[in-house]
Image: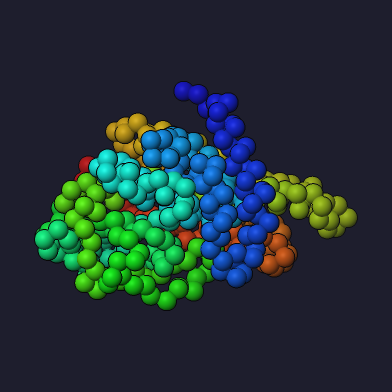
Amino acid sequence: MDFSLSAEQRAIRDMAADFAAGEMEPHARQWDEEAIFPVETLRKAAGLGFGGLYIGEDVGGSALTRLDAAIVFEELAKGCTSTAAYISIHNMAAWMIDAFGTPDQRRTFLPDLCSMQHFASYCLTEPGSGSDAAALRTRAERDGDSYVLNGSKAFISGGGASDLYVCMVRTGGEGPDGISCLVVEKDRPGVSFGAQEVKLGWKSQPTAMVQFDNARVPVGNCIGGEGAGFRIAMAGLDGGRINIGACSLGAAQTCLDRAIAYMQERRQFGRAIAEFQALQFRVADMATDLEAARLMLHKAALMVDEKAPGATRQAAMAKRLATDTGFSVVNEALQLHGGYGYLRDYPIERFLRDVRVHQILEGTNEIMRLIIARDIFGR
């Protein structure tokens, strides 16, 4: 058991931190206010290996570990949480192809995903099935060498902008065994997109409904074989939960750091507010909670990499704790800024808006508790 980062991990962390500070943070406010999807910045990130963090090197990936990726996402989120979260989703979708695809599928799709010449989205949620993912209705009927898709996917990050959509669709009967995974290209006839959603946060990444109206997709785009889709989706989410938890920690850490600096400058009643013990205790609790969540997240990353027994439960625990803690710490940091924290002149309110959704996506935190409880009680 070694809690220290290796020299290589420290170098990866520093590289991600420098990129976040130099290429993301200076533009994050504009991306947020103007809803800009920063394509060129994303491709610069891919140039550092962030487009395929745990994808095989033979197709252009970085072949890093889940822990390495968590370290990267925590640092990137300090620059722009919304953009870091999109990179995490892109990586999750690419990993599904890497882990479950055939050699031909990997060679076809992954080089352009790792360079982010193409962007990827993950499509599981539907208008009528969110937490109850196994109840999805989007249908793919076999017709010769193609599947014909009908249905829709909701709340899709990258919707309308991404080039590839890793979709969970129903090719068989009811329940999880009837679900398959298809890669659907954006320009397929019958694929269309709804209006861009107007959101509280995550404004640097587009979000839209993806619609299929007799869209024909080659049978060769089926990942893992028919009936494997639900298993692929859940495996992807184990890693996705770690990534989004890391993004929450990064946002919370930078907000805590900013609150500490602000408290040392802000004076009330004749002294810096950092000298008030009540506020010191609040900061102490924030720092403690963040460290505890980080340790749990890093343990989950190791377990997912090792395919250890209990990895899914640990990932759910880590996601629940990291995203709840992340939002709480950001909210406390805003409070410590007083009225200034509520202004757009300070970035705290943007971080608050961006991290709020982390408690909902990749499985709501209520579903995380359900996963944990079922594992505890053997159900």
Relative horizontal placement of residue 103, taking residue 24 as reference (left or right): left
Between residues 301 and 323, which one lies in front from this camera angle? 301
Between residues 121 and 241, which one lies in front from this camera angle? 121
Q: Where is residue 223 drawn, in percent x and y? A: 24, 49
Direction top: furthest residue: 1
* Residue 144, quarter of picture: bottom left
The tally of labels here is 0
Q: Is residue 260 visible?
A: yes
Between residues 156 and 333, which one lies in front from this camera angle? 156
Direction right: furthest residue: 270
Q: Which residue shows up at 22% across the image and 42% down it?
A: 378
Between residues 159 and 315, which one lies in front from this camera angle? 159
Q: Which residue shows up at 34% across the image and 49% down it?
A: 109
Q: Where is residue 14 drawn, in percent x and y? A: 62, 37
* Residue 196, quarter of picture: bottom left
Q: Where is residue 145 drawn, in percent x and y? A: 14, 58
Relative horizontal placement of residue 230, taking residue 70 as reference (left or right): left
Q: Which residue shows up at 28% across the image and 70% down it?
A: 189
Q: Which residue shows up at 64% across the image and 51% down it?
A: 23
Q: Is residue 172 above or below residue 111?
A: below
Q: Where is residue 47 drawn, in percent x and y? A: 54, 44
Look at the image and name its color scheme.
Answer: rainbow
Q: Is residue 354 visible?
A: no
Relative horizontal placement of residue 375, taking residue 302 as reference (left or right): left
